[in-house]
Image (spheres, rainbow, N blue to C red):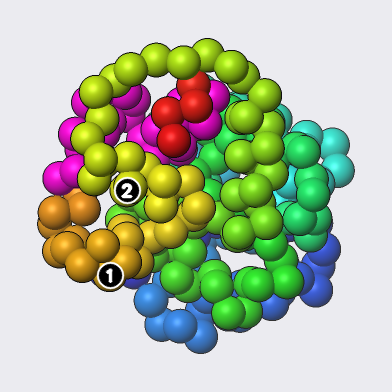
Amino acid sequence: MEIGIMIYEDNASLRESLNNLLLLSGTYCVLGAYENCSSVITDVEALQPDVILMDIDLPGINGIEAVKRIRRANQKVQIIMLTVFDDNTHVYDALYAGANGYLLKKYISDKLGSAIDEVLQGGAPMSPSIARIVISHMHESAAVNDYQLTVREKEILQSLSGGNSFKLIAAELSISLETVRTHIKHIYDKLHVQSQIEAVSKAFTEKLI
């Protein structure tokens, strides 16, 4: 079954490149490609995509505001933010707006497919430099809590915070992918969160790792 993708990107050349890259894979179906988010809610409700690729810097309604609007209507669709900046503090705002991952445009040709696959598996694809932005902002909070995380759970949470995929964590710790998923479920339960983004955010905000 093809994975439905929607693209929001104001650069016509890049928008076309994204469209062609996805179509050539044979795995994805591009449901729509738009230069702005003027009708984003109508578009998403009509087409019901699996994944949205959202530029941060769009004219009119920017990508962050668009994510907020989408999340008020749809909690299930996976949203990957696209940005040309590796020092853009708007990424932090997008995190709380409800984005699931972040990809620097310079890595699109190499990383787009794996980023889509990862986000659909429950991960949070994030370029290393973007992860550092998130970390630096979250370190500003000094709150400390004890959620009784085990040593292994803290190891996995630390790896998640670096933007590593579930598969990479399993390889690094020499455990199975299913074991990683089980540990992550326990982490979510202990931290009272529902997603990887929320877990990483809480971990850094409250200095758990």
Instruction: Give the position of the C terminus as an image quadrant.
Output: top left
Pinpoint residue 18: horizontal percent, then vertical percent: 64, 72
Amino acid type at mark 2: Ile
Which residue is depicted at the point 63% across and 40% down? Answer: 134
Residue that mark 1 sits on: 171
Pinpoint residue 50: horizontal percent, then vertical percent: 40, 52
Residue that mark 2 sits on: 156
Pointer 1 with pointer 2, Cβ within 8 A: no
Q: Is residue 52 visible?
A: no
Which residue is depicted at the point 32% across and 48% down? Answer: 156
Amino acid type at mark 1: Ala
Q: Residues within 10 Å of mark 2 (few under 14, many from 20)?
A: many
Q: What is the chief secondary structure element of the magenta stretch?
A: helix
Which residue is depicted at the point 47% across and 72% down? Answer: 113
Q: Residue furthest right?
A: 59
Q: Is residue 2 left or right of residue 46?
A: left
Q: Residue furthest front?
A: 151
Q: Is residue 103 left or right of residue 185?
A: right
Quarter of the image for residue 76 reads top left
Numbered range of the magenta stretch:
182-205
For the residues labelled 1 and 2, the Cα–Cα distance comes to 11 Å
Q: Is residue 172 visible?
A: yes
Q: Is residue 126 left or right of residue 94?
A: left
Quarter of the image for residue 127 reads bottom right
Magenta stretch encompasses residue 196: yes
Instruction: Give the position of the N terminus as an image quadrant.
Output: bottom left
Q: Which mark is drawn over residue 145?
A: none
